Image (cartoon, helix red, strand yellow):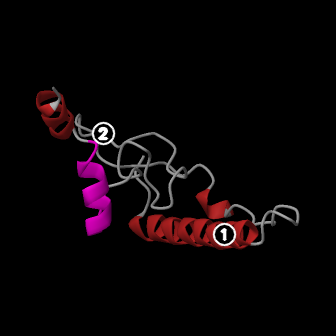
Amino acid sequence: MITDPVLRAEQVKALKAFYRDAKVKYKAWVAGGYKQPAPACLPFPDICIGMKCEARTRSGAPCKNNGTDWGNGRCKHHGGASTGPVTPEGKKRVSMNGPSNKVLEALTKP
């Protein structure tokens, strides 16, 4: 069942606010050296309970996975994971571990 687009937008907005608040509080807790008890976060938004991913699958049906695992309202299969390195430093670090680099090292070793 497809959710109303207006309701879906409100759900995603509430979910992003929830994760943003949790991230800010967690970073402050880490910066403080974990000395105080873990911070209390906002309660999970009621509007997001039962929220589904709803991305279109290859069969054309909406995805039925839980859509609250990531901050964008999608499941891990439809937009929750990393898109890869963005900065030049990150790209260089990733290129050092690639298979082509390992092949070159194996060929150049005596």
Q: Position of residue 28 (x, y in %)?
A: 71, 73
Mark 1, residue position? 27
Q: Is residue 47 left or right of residue 66?
A: right
Q: Position of residue 45 (x, y in %)?
A: 67, 64
- Relative vertical location of residue 109 with respect to residue 31 in this rendering, above or below: above
> In the rendered image, which quarter contains the C terminus?
top left
- Labels in figure, total: 2
Q: Position of residue 26 (x, y in %)?
A: 69, 66
Q: Which residues are magenta?
A: 84-97
Q: Is residue 110 left or right of residue 63?
A: left
Q: Position of residue 63 (x, y in %)?
A: 38, 41
Task: Find the distance from the CA under tag 1 to the CA under tag 2.
Answer: 39 Å
Mark 2, residue position? 61
For residue 42, say whether it is visible.
no
Name the residue type under label 2: Ala
From the image, state whether disc 1 or disc 2 is nearer to you.
1
For image coordinates 52% across by 44% down, the residue present is: 66
Earlier sequence position, callout 1 versus callout 2: 1
Callout 1: 10 Å neighbours few (<14), some, many (20+)? few
